[in-house]
Each structure stands twice: as structure tokens, then as C-alpha cells.
Amino acid sequence: MIHAENIYFKYYKEYVLKNINFSVKNGEIFGIIGKTGSGKSTLVNILSGLVKPDEGTVFIDGKNIFNKKESGNLLSKKISTVFQHPEKQLFNKCIYDDIAFSMKNQNIPEDIIKKNITEVCKFLNISDDILNSSPFCISGGEKRKCALACALVTKPKILILDEPTSGLDAYTANKFLNYIKEYHNKEKSTIIFTSNSVGNFAYLCDKILILDNGEEKILDKPENIFKKCKELGFSAPNIWQIISIINSKGYNIPEKTSTISEMQENIWKLIKEKEVENKCKI
Amino acid sequence: MIKVENIIKFKNVSYQKPSFFGVQKSKYILKNINLNIKKGEFVCVMGANGCGKSTLAKHFNGLLLPSQGDVIICGKNTKNDKDNLEIKKNVGMIFQNPESQIVACTVEEEIAFGMENLCFSREKMGKNIKKVLQDVNLAGHEKASTFSLSCGEKQRLAIASVLAMQPKILILDEPTSMLDDKSKGQIFDIILKLNKEKGITIVLITHFINEAVYSDRTVIMNNGSMAAFGDTEDIISDINLLKNNNLVPPESACVLDFLKNKGYNVDSKAFSNESCAEQIFKILGSIK
């Protein structure tokens, strides 16, 4: 379990995080959503143990991550982070070396490293061509996929993703989402992600924290967040918007509908029900 | 009929990546691109990650030169060294990551940087700085350090710096990928205003279909080649074309296409969520 307690953080004299408290249970997907400048990335840096808060702390399974005795083991073996700009975490001569980097540091034998990399590349659909490329020679989306590969290859218990789909096209973003979903199902790990919009990722979450100007605004389930999107200044996911327009006229499409095929199925059901209803009237 | 000048012309443009310390094999990133964009047009370039969109963008102002073929901007070839300044003056670029184009320490200096290089007068610079900062909602931040800005603010600053130089053509390479919904809307209001009121030619590189709907024409790229170029409405409503090129059609278009395949008469160009719901109500209302 991750428990953030009473976190305050300031740059110069200005507080960017004020009194942040939340708990994430093992295996949960937790979303941190806020506008640009709301303190999301700072919070991610604190949760991954890179930045120490001015006040408060973070506990993982009851252990303080800023306690020097615990932090090394806790942070390197349990948490993997994919940062907002993946190019900042790719620094080797070729992508293969980048993905192997953390395992080499943990003294994992070469044949296991090779096996793990083959496995993760198959999972994320990374070609040999890209593995042999320099990080300077691949596109933004590919870099992000490689940064994710670096994080997933060690099978972390906690995966932190800072704006994982920013800069990705919708197709790759959906694929990325599916990778995360699949990884979560397989490894049952805890996933924390940040986003500046209430997009498709929000459907996956068990809980969402809305950050506003460094403060906790709402901590709630995704369905409840979608309802309040307008007043919070976000747009709700398109599927949810279409469904809520239809339901506002007295129809009853389940609010949990989250994919296009589910939506098509539900609308088809609605049409068929209406047909049966009208036939009965006649 | 008035003949509108093609302000941007790509003639059989191909681009081959140079080898990188022998690590990277050289391969073609752009393959035989032919593109004509008229003055005042708003063109959108769409394609999956890695299809060559950003490489294409860098060809508009000569940051990259084609390995084969020619790029003609305002009648001038980007390959001619002597026209280089003229082309760069006319074409403003905004990149995916604002951090890659911010060079100065304060917001004011950053915006002045481009103008100083183009020898704008001091008064004009002062006036422009105020105006563009208002346009991007950063008024009052003149003296702020560029390092203290958040990512979204940095992107808005990058846009302001380019706008200050009053370019004829604006190339925006995924300008909203790091912005929140509210700022995205603000940026689009500015882009549309520049296009409609000032007649600036806009080339927008994006993967968001809800951003492409604002454009007149859309280019679809796939693996370095142009897969389609046509009216935005036609392209976005062609679900198969989008899917074949690894793009995700809008949710509303998928629902309408599904209903059309079931034999209902729907307007497949009703992209907005409201008009899509309207089409569904029409079907429900027509059931007897």
C-alpha cells in the first residue's frame, strides 16, 4: 500500500503542493489529474522518491521511502517510473542498452537480461531495428514505448507513469493503454498515472485525485468525476458525453460503457428495445 | 475565378536519414511527397507516431533539406542558401516540446529574441510582446523566468514568440500535446483567429481528430508516404481510411458508421457528440 501523508512542497517561496493525503491499495490503478502547473509532476517525483517533500512523507507497505536505510531497496526494486519526456530517461548508445541498464545494475545474468528484453519487446511490439537504434534516431512515440519497456522489464510492483499518453497518437495511446491494462492483469501491480485531461485512461482507474493549484480538490471514483467534469474545467471522455446526452432524454444506457464496441452494442440494444416496445403498443 | 497562389509546394520530396555514427542504417523517412497548399489555407497533417510528420514539418522552413525533390515556400526553394532568411522569416515553427525552442531566461527576452534577429524596432517589439502575451493568456508574466513556467505555459510562450515575428505561414507540430483541455481550447481560438482574420496559412500536425476538424484539408501520412490528401470532412468520415493508417476515428463517427451498416440513414459527417446523439434520437423517433 502507498500512503502519502500531509505532503507540502515549495519551489522558492511558493507552495506547489499543499496538504496532499491519499492511500493507494496494492493492485489499484490511481489517477492524478490536474491542469498544467497543478503540481502533478512534482507529486510524481515525490512518490518515486526523487524529491523529498518539505513536510510530510510517503509510506510504501508501511515503510518510509525517505528513510535512508529503506529507500535504496524500496525504490530500486519496487518502483519504476516513466517520465513525461521519455527522451530524458534514454541515454545509452542504443535502446537495447537502455532497457538492459537497470537489470545490469542489479547484477542479473546476461542470459536472463536477454530473455526479459525479448519478452518485453514482444509484449510492446518493439522491433529489432528499434532495439539497435540510438535514442536520438527514433520518433517520440517509439521513445515513449522504449521508456515503458525500461520500466516494465524489471516487473515492478509499483508503476508510476507521468502523463503516459501525452504526445502519442490515439492509436498508439490506445495500444499503450491496453499494454498497461494487460500488464496490470498479469502482474497485479499498483499503477499511478498523471494526466492533464480526463481521457480514456480515467476509465481504468479505481480512484482519481483531482489536483488544483497544488491542492487536493476531489478524490473519487471515475464515474463521479465524469459527472463533475464541466464544473472542474475538464472535458469528460467522448463516449461518456454521448451517453449522457442520450440518457438526458430519459433513456438508460449503462454509465460504465467505456469502449466503442460496448457503446455500439448498447445503442443497438436501445433501438431493438424501442422497436419491441412500439410493437407491443400496437 | 480568382487563382489562389500555392504558397507551399512540395515536389517529389524524399528524405533519407543520415547515418548516426554508423549505428543507424540510413532509411527513407519521407517518400515522394507531393503537396500544394494555398495561401490562407488551414491544412492538417495526421498520421501515427513515427510516420514522418515531424520530419515533414522540418522541411517547411528549411530546417531539413530534401534528399530528393524540392520544397518551394512563397516561390523560393529551401535549397537556395540566399533565400534562407526570407523563408525563415515567412515560416514560423512551433515544436512538439516547447523546451526545445526556449532559449532566453525571461519571458520578455524569449519573445524579443526572434524579433531582435529580424531587426524590429524597440517600440514595435514592446508593443508586440504585450499583444502576444495577451493572446496566449500570459499577460503580466513579462519578467518571469522561463524556468519557472509549467510545461503548458512554456508551450504558450513558444507560440507567443513565433507570433511576435508575424509570419505568413505557421507550422505547428503537435502544439497542444502537453496542454490541458482549457489551454487547448485557448490555443485553438488563437490559431483559428490567425487563420480566419489575418489570413495566415496554417499547417497543423496533430493526431487528435477533434483538432483536425477545424482544418480545410487534411493530409494522412503512413510510413513516410502520403496516404490521402483531401477535404477534412471526407477524410475524417472515412473510417476505413483512418483505421488502415493506424488512426483512431472519432467515437461518434464509429457509432454513425455502425448504424449506417445496419441500414439506417444517418449523416456520417455529424462528428460532434451533440449531433451524433441527435442522429440517434432521429432513429429512435422514427421507430414505428
Image (spheres, coloured by chain):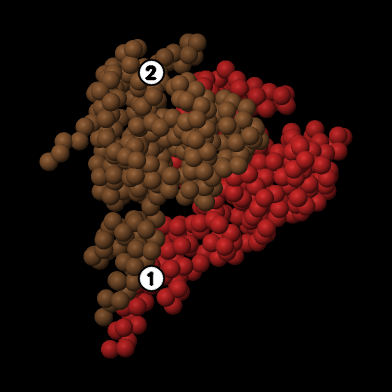
Chain colours: A red, B brown
Quadrant of the image occupied by residue B148 = top right
Crowding at mark 1 (Cα within 10 Å: few <14, some 14-19, many 20+): few
Q: Nearer the viewer, residue A198 or B176?
A: B176
Quadrant of the image occupied by residue B83 = top left
Quadrant of the image occupied by residue A37 = top right
In the rendered view of the protein, which quadrant contains the C terminus of chain B?
Answer: bottom left
Q: Nearer the viewer, mark 2 or mark 1?
A: 2
Name the spot of residue B79 as percent of width and height, x first: 32, 15
- At x 47%, y 31%, the residue is B124
Q: Nearer the viewer, residue B210 or A3?
A: B210
In the rendered structure, which amino acid carries the disc numbered 1?
A: Lys
Q: Which residue is mark 1?
A: A269
- Mark 1 secondary-structure assignment: helix
- At x 52%, y 64%, the residue is A256
Q: Which residue is mark 2?
A: B85
Does residue A178 show up? no
Chain at numbered mark 1? A
- At x 48%, y 62%, the residue is A240
Crowding at mark 2 (Cα within 10 Å: few <14, some 14-19, many 20+): some
Name the spot of residue B67 as percent of width and height, x first: 32, 16
